[in-house]
Amino acid sequence: MSKLQCVPANTITGKDLDYLSDMFQWNFIALKKTANDIELIKDQKIVDLFSDASTLFEDNLNNVLDIIDNPGGDSDE
């Protein structure tokens, strides 16, 4: 029988880091595109939509950074 290796909860594996890196890049590119295009749009409803999308993408970026900074989450819970 093979031994099952346990990964500590506060560890990020290489596969996890690859996924987080991809997620960060997707959201970063989307944030750049929406933030740059806002200046070119004249319709206020679309400007508001792009602004909301930019906020969402920025929040996603911060969530990824939080996961990398604290991979196991709060251990006090």
Image (cartoon, helix red, strand yellow):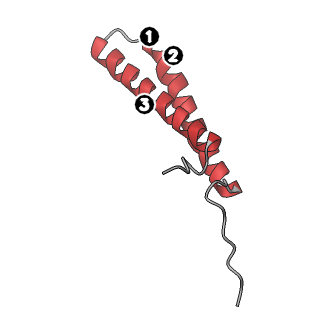
Q: Secondary structure at mark 2?
A: helix
Specify which label sits upstream in the sequence, 1 or 3. 1
For badge 1, the amino acid type reads Leu
CA neighbours of label 2 inside 10 A, class few (<14), some (14 to 19), many (20+): few
- Tell which of 44 and 15 is nearer to you: 15
* In contact (CB < 8 Å): disc 2 and disc 1: yes
Q: Position of residue 10 (x, y in %)?
A: 64, 54
For the residues marked 1 and 3, what is the alpha-carbon distance in whole angstroms? 20 Å
Where, by quadrant of the figure, is residue 22 drawn?
top right
Which numbered mark, 2 or 1, is in the foreground of this view?
Answer: 2
As drawn, the label of residue 40 is 1
Q: Which residue is mark 3?
A: 56
Horizontally, is 77 left or right of 64 in the view?
Answer: left
Where, by quadrant of the figure, is residue 52 drawn?
top left
Question: Image quadrant for the N terminus?
Answer: bottom right
Q: 44 above or below 8? A: above
| Identity of the residue furthest to the left in this view | 45
Specify which label sits upstream in the sequence, 2 or 3. 2
Q: 30 above or below 38? A: below
Q: Which residue is mark 2?
A: 36
